[in-house]
Image (spheres, coloured by chain):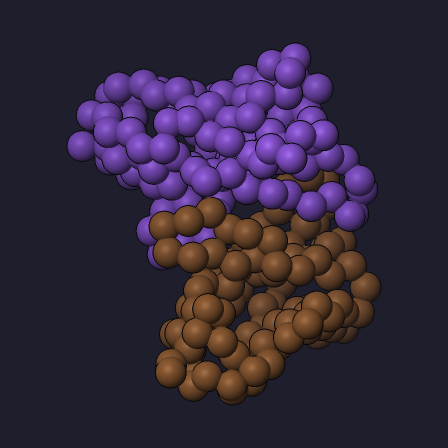
Amino acid sequence: RKEVEQDPGPFNVPEGATVAFNCTYSNSASQSFFWYRQDCRKEPKLLMSVYSSGNEDGRFTAQLNRASQYISLLIRDSKLSDSATYLCAVRITGNQFYFGTGTSLTVIP
Amino acid sequence: DAGVTQSPTHLIKTRGQQVTLRCSPKSGHDTVSWYQQALGQGPQFIFQYYEEEERQRGNFPDRFSGHQFPNYSSELNVNALLLGDSALYLCASSTPRGFQETQYFGPGTRLLVL
């Protein structure tokens, strides 16, 4: 079983829509959680860190549900520039980060 | 504030050859992690270096080795290249902060093995 699983999508949404992605993790000892954004042929860029129940930054909200072992990313009022692949990452113990395969988002005019 | 840098940006090699990739961490960071990202996949952890030693290793064969220098920069070496080694190789830097340790990625080196 993979440490981190994401729905690969693609998610195609109109501008202004609200879209949510889920990411499940298998190890209950996971300590910290991250969402990265990756544009085509570019490196992942940190979007948000989640250490407790959740985090909010403008139109982006990340929530952590330890009981069900998933984290979510909510994007409100989607912009064309939000089109990218969103990677979920989990740090268990030690220093290794596990990444999901990413969820592809396309925002349509 | 200089971010993470990697060189070269692109590389073409043939099977059986050896390759060395380089990474300089973000200013103020002393830990370097290396990842392999195949097309359509998420980054896969290769190993991490801290204080010039390999601190943790992922599920990669011994053909993958590395080094960290006193200035915190790092190299990733891959011997006896296979076609399946073609991927984007990402370096991420961080500084130990317990559970709050956050990794920042460089632009990557795109390796093609023919």
Please state, as top left, top right, bottom left or bottom right, where the C terminus of chain B lies in the image.
top left
Residue located 64% across and 43% down the image: B103
Residue located 81% across and 64% down the image: A52
Asked if residue A27 lies left or right of residue B99, the reply is left
Q: Nearer the viewer, residue A58 or A34?
A: A58
Question: Is B100 placed above or below B29 here?
Answer: below
Residue located 73% across and 55% down the image: A32
Asked if residue A40 lies left or right of residue A36, the reply is left
Q: Is residue A42 visible?
A: yes
Badge count: 0
Q: Nearer the viewer, residue B64 or A17?
A: A17
Question: Is A40 placed above or below A80 here?
Answer: above
Q: Nearer the viewer, residue B2 or B60?
A: B2
* Residue A53: image location, x then y, percent: 80, 69
Answer with the quarter of the image where residue B73 lies. top right
Q: Which chain has been coloured purple in this picture?
A: B
Q: Which chain has been coloured brown in this picture?
A: A
